């Protein structure tokens, strides 16, 4: 026969064990929640964290802008093929296709528009059109570099190679950041000094002075 003291002690042990189990479950849930909350995407390189590491049109290529000279090839149609420059208003004029807005488009997007234009003109059956950039707009490097100025754009350019083209940094240059004004944007934005940051035609790259 179990006396009252033993029964009370047994029930007390059960209650303590239950409380420990509840506390352990609560603690595990809280830790899991905190860990999930820590999985936050890092801020981008812009001053306000809103800018991605890649530049405009990265998913489908560089976006065309005024001043770009295009090489348009219409297979089997030499009279329609040639080089055409995007005017300051962002438009380009081609035979049969007429004048159309090209600024802001990628090369594949312009190819599709021209293909549709030539098809609707009923002059060409199943036209095959390719668009290449014959000459890019220049880019600019200013600030703490040895040779600031305007330079012809090279495909695949990044912040580090752009600075190298401008003769490299001066001894006063920042070793951690660079300022870039993208074509079509207003004002400079801060980016990390890294080869992962691309430079596009028309970009203005400014190397700031470091703090001593």
Image (spheres, rainbow, N blue to C red):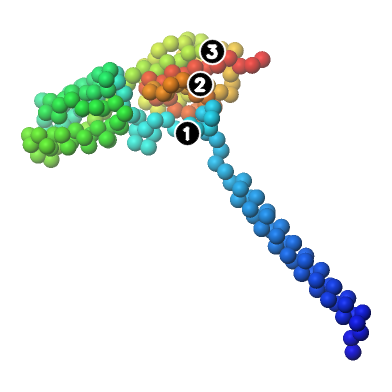
Q: Quadrant of the C terminus?
A: top right
The residue pinned by badge 1 equals: 52
Q: Residues within 10 Å of mark 1 (few under 14, many from 20)?
A: few
Left or right, residue 155 beside residue 117: right
The residue pinned by badge 2 equals: 179
Left or right, residue 90 beside residue 146: left
Q: Observer-nearest residue: 13 or 60?
A: 13
* Residue in the picture at 74% in, 62% down: 23
Q: Quadrant of the N terminus?
A: bottom right
**Mark closer to the observer (3, 1):** 1
Q: Position of residue 36 (x, y in %)?
A: 60, 50
- Secondary structure beneath label 3: loop
**Mark closer to the observer (3, 2):** 2
Q: Residues within 10 Å of mark 2 (few under 14, many from 20)?
A: many
Residue 28 against residue 151 in the figure, above or below: below
Dot 3 or dot 1, earlier in sequence: 1
Q: How many marks?
A: 3
Residue 154 against residue 76 in the figure, above or below: above
Q: Observer-nearest residue: 110 or 79?
A: 110
* Residue in the picture at 90% in, 80% down: 6
Q: Are marks 3 and 1 in contact (CB under 8 Å)?
A: no
- Secondary structure beneath label 1: loop
- Secondary structure beneath label 2: strand
Q: Observer-nearest residue: 176 or 97?
A: 97
The residue pinned by badge 3 equals: 144
Q: Position of residue 109 (x, y in %)?
A: 27, 35
């Amino acid at each position: 026969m179990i006396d009252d003291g033993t029964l009370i002690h047994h029930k007390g042990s059960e209650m303590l064990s239950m409380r420990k189990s509840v506390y352990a479950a609560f603690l595990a849930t809280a830790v899991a929640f905190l860990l999930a909350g820590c999985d936050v995407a890092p801020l981008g390189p812009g001053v306000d964290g809103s800018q991605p590491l890649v530049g405009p049109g990265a998913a489908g290529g560089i976006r065309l802008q005024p001043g770009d000279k295009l090489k348009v090839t219409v297979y089997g149609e030499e009279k329609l093929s040639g080089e055409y420059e995007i005017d300051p208003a962002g438009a380009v004029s081609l035979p049969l296709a007429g004048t159309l807005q090209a600024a802001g488009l990628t090369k594949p997007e312009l190819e599709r528009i021209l293909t549709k234009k030539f098809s609707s003109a009923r002059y060409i059956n199943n036209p095959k059109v390719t668009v290449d950039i014959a000459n890019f707009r220049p880019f600019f490097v200013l600030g703490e570099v040895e040779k600031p100025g305007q330079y012809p754009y090279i495909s695949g350019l990044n912040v580090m190679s752009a600075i190298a083209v401008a003769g490299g940094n001066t001894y006063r240059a920042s070793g951690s950041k660079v300022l870039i004004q993208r074509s079509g944007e207003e004002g400079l934005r801060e980016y990390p000094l890294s080869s992962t940051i691309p430079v596009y035609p028309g970009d203005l790259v400014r190397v700031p002075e470091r703090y001593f």
